Amino acid sequence: MIRPEIPGSMPVSEVELLVFVMDGSGSMSETCTPDGRSKAEHLYDIVHGVLNRLMNSSKKDVFRISFVYFSDTIKVEEINNSCYFPIDIAISNLRNPLDVVGGGSTAIADALAKVNEIFDKFSEDEGIPEDKKATVFLFTDGQENVRGKDDVIQEAKKLLTYPLSPVIATISFGSDADESLLMEIASKPNDRQIRHLDISGVLSELPDTNKLYLQGHASDGTITRRKIEAIRNFVETLSVTRT
């Protein structure tokens, strides 16, 4: 599949796919946040803020962005028959996950299976450089209740063994999240990632510095301003340390 060159983009020798897998299940409507807005609204703001930061970076032309929204329904954002796009287009088309999949149960395994399909299309795309990398950011406040934990682990293993050598970073967004599962499926950081997470002040926020899992909520389950900033720094740092 060959794509025309994107007007205004700079030639790049490598490309980094960032896949944002965002929970839109019913519990994401909860308002245990600093300003009384829903967790889903704050998730939208966090991702939007990260994309804006990357848009203003010197590496903005390296990135392609994909959105997977999930509850017990899975929705992959598509624009002009593509499921990944440059940052400026991504910013304009990012949506609140609750508005897309409308609440319901939590199908993490099915969401990760969709990421595998995106990887297939990305890998086969001859219109972008052959040097391709990928990072998956999974945000959830719940537990797999459509399939089973083993299904989540198997889908994650399929991604981690994909030829793109992807990274999976997981973020819990509430005390009902299955933190042990999120810890298990998260990638191990390399030395460069550890160094930059430390510089950005996020390393100390990780429950286990040998896993790219961030607890995005306080001990009482609230999404505090401190945690929101930690999530932003976690996602941005991991985005730029692969390129």
Image (cartoon, rainbow, N blue to C red):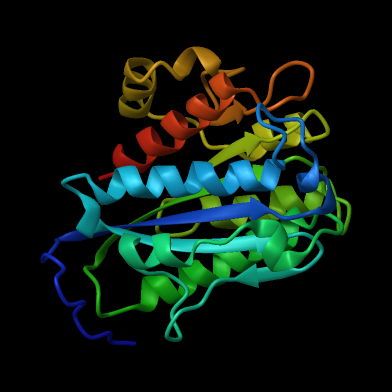
Q: Is residue 167 visible?
A: no
Q: How many marks?
A: 0
Q: Quadrant of residue 141?
A: top right
- Residue 100, position in %: x, y? 68, 67
User: Residue drawn at (50%, 31%), measured in percent from left and top?
Assistant: 188
- Residue 171, position in %: x, y? 61, 36
Q: Please state if 56 lies on the left or on the right of 187 as rendered.
A: left
Q: Nearer the viewer, residue 42 or 202?
A: 42
Quadrant into which the N terminus falls: bottom left
- Residue 79, position in %: x, y? 45, 79
| Residue occupying the far front of the picture | 35
Q: Is residue 63 visible?
A: yes
Q: Quadrant of residue 175?
A: top right
User: Residue drawn at (63%, 51%), measured in percent from left and top?
Assistant: 156
| Residue occupying the far left of the picture | 11
User: Residue drawn at (54%, 16%), measured in percent from left and top?
Assistant: 205
Q: Is residue 27 above or below residue 131?
A: above
Quadrant into which the C terminus falls: top left
Q: Quadrant of residue 88?
A: bottom left
Q: Is residue 215 above or below residue 93?
A: above
Q: Nearer the viewer, residue 16 or 98?
A: 98
- Residue 41, position in %: x, y? 63, 47
Q: Nearer the viewer, residue 28 or 235?
A: 28
Q: Please state if 213 lies on the left or on the right of 163 as rendered.
A: right
